[in-house]
Image (cartoon, helix red, strand yellow):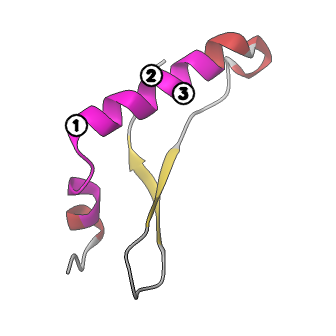
Amino acid sequence: MRSTRYAKAGALAQVNKKRIINAAQFFMMTNPELSQKNLRVDVIFLAPFTWPTHLQGAFETTR
C-alpha cells in the first residue's frame, strides 16, 4: 500500500501525466479567458475497499 504523497504521485505513469497535461492545455487554448490563470493538477486515487485519496498539486504543468 502506498503510504506517502510521493509514492502515490509516482503511481501516475508518465503517459498518463502527458495525457492529462495535453487535455489541460487544449482546455486552456479553447478558453482564452482562462489563459492567464495558474493551473494545478489534482489527482484522486481510487482503490477497492479504501477511501479515495485526494492528492493536491500532484505534478507541475507548463503552459
Q: Are marks 2 and 1 in contact (CB under 8 Å)?
A: no
Secondary structure at numbered mark 1 = helix
Secondary structure at numbered mark 3 = helix
In this rendering, position of residue 60 left or right of residue 36: left
Asked whether 20 or 63 is in front, the reply is: 20
Q: CA distance from mark 3 to mark 1?
A: 15 Å
Q: Are marks 2 and 3 in contact (CB under 8 Å)?
A: yes
Lower position in the chain sequence, tag 2 or tag 1? 1
Please give the residue where the numbered disc 2 appears in the rendered image.
22
Specify the segment rendered in magenta: 8-27
The count of marks equals 3
Q: Residue at x 39, y 29 (%)?
A: 19
Residue 61 appears in view: no
Q: Amino acid at mark 2?
A: Asn
Q: Residue at x 37, y 74 (%)?
A: 47
Residue 35: percent from the left, percent from the top? Answer: 67, 17
Above or below: residue 58 compared with residue 61:
below
Q: Quadrant of residue 7?
A: bottom left
Q: Residue at x 67, y 28 (%)?
A: 37
Secondary structure at numbered mark 2 = helix
Q: Amino acid at mark 3?
A: Ala
Q: CA distance from mark 2 to mark 3?
A: 5 Å
Please give the residue where the numbered disc 3 appears in the rendered image.
24
Identify the residue at the far front of this view: 48
Please give the residue where the numbered disc 1 appears in the rendered image.
14
Q: Residue at x 47, y 84 (%)?
A: 51
Lower position in the chain sequence, tag 3 or tag 1? 1
- Picture quarter with the N terminus: bottom left
